[in-house]
């Protein structure tokens, strides 16, 4: 099991949704929902701390895998992430993704925090910084309107090259 | 050192024209901005102000650039909180683009990027707008997609 204290939050995205905390929790953890807003990926998660987690591509391949670090419905869901679906990416250290759900007046506040255990370059962080707004805007649309947004997700320019360089140099080993 | 700034991106199922109208129409702004609205003719060089429902000025400045459906740049200073006003001028850029989408699904969306940057030094102003923009923009997205806002009481959460 990883030590969350060794991870530093690098990207935060906050969005407010006209929904309930239970429905937002379901949208994050139920494959029927994730398929609609998360690039077509279906989530599979063992609902306990230490349980296995993955996001599957429509053809069944595992795109992302990890372990549940915290499972506290309907408030907090945290897990490690390793991108397996793209070459090189699977050699990166895992990152830690934490969703926090809280009532905010008549709406629900969803906070996503992406944390890393190494001095990760901005060019790699840019992947999450461009992806999360599209993914979580889609989640909000699915919950509020029943319709997804279908915004295209792709690694931003320079990200794949930065991952290749990082994997070749492995700066996380020198610490 | 880069200047203190906050960037927020949202995708909205709407058109650039409707989004521009929502960003510039005082009646619409009041709905998603918790009762605050803008006074402005949206021409470059014109004065711009955000007003509370009781007429007090919340923020003021001027329009730097206004390209309907594409880009709005406002020189912006807080006027009602001395500690924020003390940090001086900021620049807020709102950019509207069509998002790349999966043509098979036909779900066209518009990408709104808000970049709010302080001209000088300080952390409080950027901290304040970092808390405010997600609430305001989430409300704007709800209003455009569903016809009603997510919440009309501003909460500290």
Image (cartoon, rainbow, N blue to C red):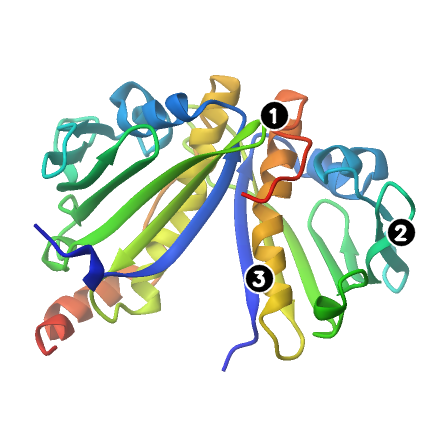
Q: Secondary structure at mark 1?
A: helix
Expressed as whole percent of the image width and height from the top left, the position of residue A160 reads 25, 59
Expressed as whole percent of the image width and height from the top left, the position of residue B83 reads 71, 69
- For label 2, the residue is B56
> Which residue of the protein is positioned furthest toward the bottom in this rendering?
B1
Q: Residues within 10 Å of mark 1 (few under 14, many from 20)?
A: some
Expressed as whole percent of the image width and height from the top left, the position of residue B116 reads 63, 62
Query: Is residue A62 visible in this depiction of the protein?
Result: yes
- For label 1, the residue is B145
Residues under numbered marks 1 and 3 in contact, where contact means CB atoms less than 8 Å apart: no
Residue at x 15%, y 74% (from the top left corner): A171
Query: Is residue B106 visible in this depiction of the protein?
Result: no
Of mark 1 and mark 3, the one earlier in the sequence is: 3
- For label 3, the residue is B127
Q: Label 1 vs label 3: CA separation? A: 28 Å
Asked if badge 1 and badge 2 are on a common chain, one would say yes
Q: Residues within 10 Å of mark 3 (few under 14, many from 20)?
A: some
Quarter of the image holding residue B84?
Answer: bottom right
Q: Residues within 10 Å of mark 2 (few under 14, many from 20)?
A: few
Of mark 3 and mark 2, the one earlier in the sequence is: 2
Expressed as whole percent of the image width and height from the top left, the position of residue A54 reads 16, 35
Of mark 1 and mark 2, the one earlier in the sequence is: 2
Q: Chain of mark 2?
A: B
Asked if badge 1 and badge 3 are on a common chain, one would say yes
Residue A129 against residue A136 in the figure, above or below: below
Residue A29 against residue A9 in the figure, above or below: above
């Amino acid at each position: 099991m990883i030590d969350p204290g060794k991870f530093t939050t690098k990207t935060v995205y906050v969005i407010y949704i006209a929904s309930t905390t239970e429905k937002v929790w379901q949208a994050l953890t139920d494959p029927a929902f994730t398929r609609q807003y998360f690039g077509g990926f279906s989530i599979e998660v063992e609902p306990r701390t230490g349980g296995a987690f993955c996001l599957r591509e429509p053809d069944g391949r595992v795109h992302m895998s990890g372990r549940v670090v915290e499972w506290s419905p309907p408030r907090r869901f945290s897990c490690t992430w390793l991108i397996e679906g793209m070459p090189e990416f699977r050699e990166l250290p895992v990152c830690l993704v934490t969703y926090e759900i809280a009532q905010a007046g008549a709406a629900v506040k969803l906070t996503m925090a992406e944390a890393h255990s190494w001095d990760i370059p901005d060019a790699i962080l840019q992947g999450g910084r461009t992806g999360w707004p599209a993914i979580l805007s889609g989640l909000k649309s699915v919950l509020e309107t029943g319709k997804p947004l279908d915004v295209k997700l792709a690694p931003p320019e320079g990200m794949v090259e930065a991952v290749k360089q990082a994997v070749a140099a492995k700066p996380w080993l020198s610490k | 050192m880069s200047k203190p700034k906050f960037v927020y991106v949202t995708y909205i199922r709407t058109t650039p024209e409707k989004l521009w109208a929502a960003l510039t129409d005082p009646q619409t702004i009041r709905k998603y901005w918790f009762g605050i609205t803008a006074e402005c003719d949206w021409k470059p060089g014109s004065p711009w102000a955000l007003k509370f429902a009781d007429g007090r000025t919340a923020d003021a400045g001027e329009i730097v650039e206004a390209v309907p459906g594409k880009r709005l740049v406002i020189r912006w200073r807080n006027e009602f909180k001395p500690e924020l006003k003390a940090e001086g001028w900021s620049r807020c850029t709102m950019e509207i683009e069509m998002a790349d989408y999966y043509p098979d699904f036909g779900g066209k969306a518009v990408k709104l990027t808000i970049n709010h940057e302080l001209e000088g030094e300080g952390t409080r102003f950027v901290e304040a707008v970092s808390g405010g923009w997600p609430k305001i923009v989430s409300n704007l997205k709800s209003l455009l997609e569903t016809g009603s806002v997510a919440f009309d009481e501003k909460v500290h959460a």
